[in-house]
Amino acid sequence: MNTTVASTPDKQRLIVVGNGMVGHHCIEQLLANGALEQYRIDVFGEEAQRAYDRVHLSEYFGGRDAESLAMSAASLYDAEGLTLHLSAQVLEIDRAKREVITAKGRFGYDKLVLATGSYPFVPPIEGAEGKSRLVYRTLDDLDAIRAAAKGKRRGVVVGGGLLGLEAANALKSLGLEAHVVEFAPRLMPVQLDDFGGAALKKRIEDLGVGVHLSKATQSITAGEDYRYRMNFAGEDFLETDLIVFSAGIRPQDALARACGLELGPRGGININDQCLTSDEHIYAIGECAAWNGGIFGLVAPGYQMARLVAAELCGLEGSPFLGADMSTKLKLLGVDVGSIGDAHGAMPGAKSYRYIDEATASYRRLVVSADGKQVLGAVLVGDNSYYDTLLQYAQNGIELPADPASLILPAGEGAPALGADALPATATICSCHNVSKASICEAIDGGCTDLAGIKSCTKAATGCGGCAALLKQVFEHELTARGVAVDKSLCEHFAYTRQELYHFVRVEGIESFEELLAKHGKGHVGCDICKPAVGSILASCWNKPIMDPSLVPLQDTNDTFMANMQKNGTYSVVPRIPGGEITPEGLIAIGQVAKKYDLYTKITGGQRIDLFGAQLHELPDIWGELIAAGFETGHAYGKSTRTVKSCVGSTWCRYGVQDSVKMALDIEHRYKGLRSPHKLKFAVSGCTRECAEAQSKDIGVIATENGWNLYVCGNGGMRPRHAELFATDLDDATLIRYIDRLLMFYIRTADKLQRTSVWRESLEGGLDYLKDVIIHDSLGLAAELEAQMQLVVDRYECEWANALSDPEKLKRFRTFVNEHGGDPDIHFVKERGQRRPARSGELHLIPLTEEAH
Amino acid sequence: MSQSNTALNIAEYWQPLCSRNDLVANSGVVALVEGQQVALFYLPDTEEEVFAIGNRDPKSGANVIGRGIVGQMGGDLVIASPLYKQHFRLSDGSCVEYPEQQLQVWPARLCGDRVEIRL
């Protein structure tokens, strides 16, 4: 074998073994420090891929590919003097000659950095092999799990720690019935205490993942119903198709061991505060290194070591490694889990405050010092919104408030939030990239005025992303402190938010856009942002028909023509079908209209029928026929009540406990025509089986033995959100009263185009505040909200019926003011028995005479 | 086509399209002129009062400009396409967001109750 000699003799040779997250971070830092001026750098990675994000590994099964998980663009390693060797295992280190040996040859070094990471520990269990001995660490491991899971039903993860639960999530997203087997009597034994473990277990079981505690697997044999049987101590067993071991990690110290480097008492390469090993030419960083005998199995301490070594190698002063904070905040299987500092209260004299909520399986523990002045640690299960504040108290030694328990009590009870201004300049905001509040302020003073700029300039919130919310808070606070207004204007014509404009309209009784613009805006025209927003406010407040001449110019084309414009300029038409209930006669009438006007017909997700391909001049005729058959407008075009989906309920269903269709009809007829900041969707389910999917709606109603449970502020679409349980066992009248109040409160206070879900999340005080306002009438608004809703309800009329009776309004439904007929440029072709818009490539197929009529 | 050639030869030829009563204040309608679709916007509070601009949205290829919302951006009167919401200046048909998109514009006027454009 030949020794590769550095091509530039005046440069030193630096070798980094390992291209995981920490090894990669070291390279990034070296490049940033200008290391290529004095070193030629070779990087050896055992895997075929360059460094990728192991923290988000389970997203690989959620649709992310290997490249999107990569830590950097491939071009980073194209720098002159830097070479990345992938699929290149280092076999040996020859410390005497200062060479590393690979299958391709010997490579000399002046300085060597070991970032070899760790490997999954698999306990010696009889019968564990092949698909009963999978591990969860690398992309290759995940490919193996995917292959093993194909066509299978059940998967088991051995190990209920952080990685084990991640692995269970991966199995779940592969469609397997997932189980977790843990040796200890609770989940996440390192980070959580018994109460926390119990809350987490409850939540995970609710997600359909089996949890088996205090189980020691003795052997794996052939199963009866599944491929394998795991035999536990005692008579117990569990059958499964595959087994993933995630029972902890072990430092990958084989190379160091073989070349005689000093190791820690429980393995790992011994390092000092400078991350130097027992050989002064060799550093070790990340999970392969043992500092003070301990291994740090998180990415943040690894990054800390990488930064230090990169600085040392470039002759810069790095801060010595003096241990690391193992606090961590995670979302495991969608469940918030947080652990800070001395989570178990092990320090002498430590005292704990605990908040246990068995109803929602939430748990919070605050560990404070003997004198009650400092936060020592914390455990969170179910809600990590407390984490940032607690961490700042713990890390920065901020003195506790008079009532420390308030830090973990539900926010509705007035927990004193630790504002961004209370943080000292030294406070670490992003621990992955070690970004302090001071460096964020520096970046702002350096001219960064948007959040994206702060992120790219400081790298804050670009690691695990856990600090994103805190970063935003600090950023906005600092901007405001510098006198930079955070601009919340609606548009260039109104320097107000929608809420403020709503207030003007109501309080001053403003009934037209012109009046509002003259009194509170700029210019005399407005734009396509403010006009529809104000149009919606006016309609919500005074419920004048949207075809009113003063409102017409404000509307989006869909509202103007009371139909939904599609890509070729034609419209779709949706008649209201309340509750999704329709008579055969109604169905036939819709069919006849569709047939007569050759409309493409499709069933919608809201239990109605959408008719596509109508031209402007056809809309009045189509609606004339629909109204004659007893239909009215479905408001599919408006930011308004859309549908109330329902199941058949107690009328037909053997499980139904209330008449869900009747309730759906009542709700739909009450709120139809209500204009709001965004569309509103409702559903009513007749029992807890929830066939109407009410928990994904703005307003969801689910029948109980005793009445109705009300769920609010759910959302499907791009960013789904489960609706939250708002009130239980309501009678009909109370249910309607709460919905009246809630919707009107939303209309009053929401932002432009803000769905109820986003509105709810933006409410300070959260769900408890909303309950106070709506149920307990804490603002004294309830009567007013109800009266306002009643006014809107009383003024309802079908906009289409109104338009059809007014020749002046019908005038608008002409494709051309000076010709009859339709747009000659609209062409259709047939597909699956119906017509659809022709694509540009299909136009030559269409005879020019087709549309002449 | 011969008719339009003739028209072009006559300086100051104003073609009547419809009556003021066909227009909708602060909004648009569409007229068909020798196979071309012209969107007409009636803004009674402006000096020009009537604007004529091409009805075909270059991005979607659909004839929808006349159904957009009139607004003001900076100092310019603009029309927002109802499909993808890009803005065109009523004065010269240029697109605010995408310089490569351009609409034709015609001089337009109210002559008594008649709406006319110059071809």
Image (tube, helix red, strand yellow):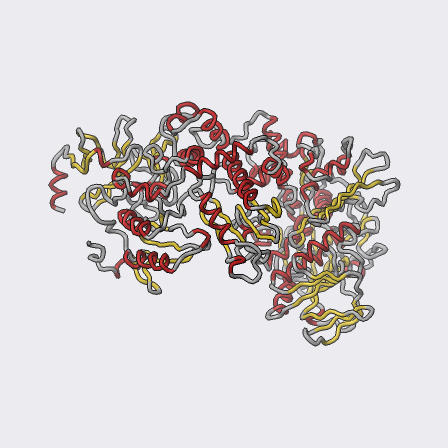
Q: Position of residue A47 (x, y in %)?
A: 65, 61
On screen, A171 above or below A532? below
The answer to which quarter of the image holds residue A769 is top right
Q: Residue furthest right?
A: A348
Of A199 and A777, nearer the camera is A777
| Residue A228 in view here | yes
Q: Position of residue A806 (x, y in %)?
A: 27, 39
Q: Position of residue B76 (x, y in %)?
A: 35, 30
Tell me the quadrant of the picture where the C terminus of chain A can be found. bottom left
On screen, A166 above or below A538? below
| Residue A717 in view here | no
Of A284 and B30, nearer the camera is B30
Q: Residue at x 63, y 57 (%)?
A: A58
Tell me the quadrant of the picture where the N terminus of chain A can be found. bottom right
The answer to which quarter of the image holds residue A325 is top right
Q: Is residue A709 left or right of residue A289?
A: left
Q: Is residue A508 left or right of residue A847?
A: right
Q: Is residue A543 left or right of residue A471?
A: left
Q: Position of residue A752 (x, y in %)?
A: 48, 37
